[in-house]
Image (tube, rainbow, N blue to C red):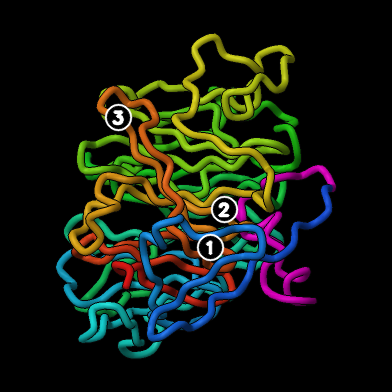
Amino acid sequence: MQLHRRIGLIGVALLVTGALAGCGSDGGDSSPTAPPSVTQVGGATSTTDESGEPPADGPLVDTVMAASVHEPIDLVQRPGDDGHLWLAERAGRIRRLEVGDDGASLSPAGDYALDISDQTTTDAERGLLGIAFSPDGGKLYVSYTDPAGNTQVVSYELAGDEVITTSRSVVFEQDQPFSNHNGGHIVFGPDDQLWLGLGDGGAADDPGNRAQDPDTYLGKMIRIDSETRDPEIVVSGIRNPWRFSFDTDGSLWIGDVGQNAVEEIDRLPADGIEGTNLGWSGYEGSEPYLDGEGRRPDAAVPPVFEYPHQNGNCSITGGFVYRGKAIPALEGAYLFADYCAGRLRAVRLAEDGTLDQELDLGVDVSHPVSFAADAGGEPYVLSQDGNIVRLAPPG
């Protein structure tokens, strides 16, 4: 996930919790300078760091403070629950939030809906890592690491807004050999099946070559049948998919965290997902990396965008393709950020799938760990520091 290089919380607390950035490096690099905190500017939040300047014609967005919570990790919609979003906190708590009349602010709607803090730990890159609802809204799926550090995906029935804790059922389990690169994001895809992203098992340089091993789910995108619960490997050669999403055309976008030098964005068209190999650890981004036996696949699919570990960058936080209405300048652009640098960015592809534009949104969010969207497709950004901000039109 994005924990390892995210020397995130502040001061000593940072060092205790680790970095939620997905392990941008495992090799003893010095910790990067923390990005600036969000500051209030005339009702909207807008930031720049000392080395970065907003675009010449001004920021493409403003950021409006929506809520301040404890280490948010995921924020999702529940089908049929209009006017609310469900928040996951990494320590193991889930709660329902009401969207305010301003369309941006979020406030708790009742007590925690679920608390599994006694079933997980926030050591290293562990914790509650993702939540998702079934397409009919009747089940809540929870992805986390248990006290031993192993991946668990479980489901709960819902009665109205109440999570029925006695209905807990195990959907998927995976042993984790190390405490980093857990992945853990879950999403229901356009096929109405549950998709899970798993990292390569951790340590540095994928010591077990798990991302290329067809006999393990580590380093893969997994599809889990919602009826039989049978898991299936769909995409291989992944290092640590810290957030993935599906666009309206069925394409799959993955923010895959790099090793020492390169962060990457992968985009697979709907008819090109099955059986794809993204190349780790034979490649880091599009660059050849390890060349040992079985490391470098012949038909590795390169990323559509990559960036180096420069200017404070260390670990990508993947987002989604913007399909909202409020910010026309972002239509069709894939939103993302870097956990350490904090600058919000986007890329837009041409019709042939090649890079068309790279956009600097002109604002920063400290330690971004997730992007989310409301029912209208308008975006939120979650900071490990506790802030949830809503992206809004500039001005």
Query: Which quadrant of the figure contains the C terminus?
Result: bottom left
- Marks 3 and 2, the one that precedes in the sequence: 2
Amino acid beneath label 3: Ala
Q: Secondary structure at mark 2?
A: strand
Q: Residue at x 34, y 82 (%)?
A: 106
Q: Is residue 10 magenta?
A: yes
Q: Is residue 215 magenta?
A: no
- Marks 3 and 1, the one that precedes in the sequence: 3
Q: Which residue is mark 1?
A: 368
Q: Mark 3 packing: few (<14 Cα in 10 Å), some, or many (20+)?
A: few
The Cα–Cα distance between marks 2 and 1, rounded to whole angstroms, is 7 Å
Instruction: Please identify the quarter of the rendering in which residue 191 is found.
Output: top left
Return the x and y of residue 368 as percentages of the image width and height.
53, 62
Q: Which residue is mark 2?
A: 338
Q: Nearer the viewer, residue 381 or 348?
A: 348
Magenta-highlighted residues: 1-28
Q: Which mark is residue 350?
A: 3
Instruction: Please identify the quarter of the rendering in which residue 393 is found.
Output: bottom left
Q: Is residue 261 left or right of residue 219?
A: right
Mark in the foreground, 3 or 1: 3
Return the x and y of residue 286 as percentages of the image width and height.
57, 24
Q: Residue at x 27, y 64 (%)?
A: 378
- Marks 2 and 1, the one that precedes in the sequence: 2
Q: Is residue 323 left or right of residue 342?
A: left
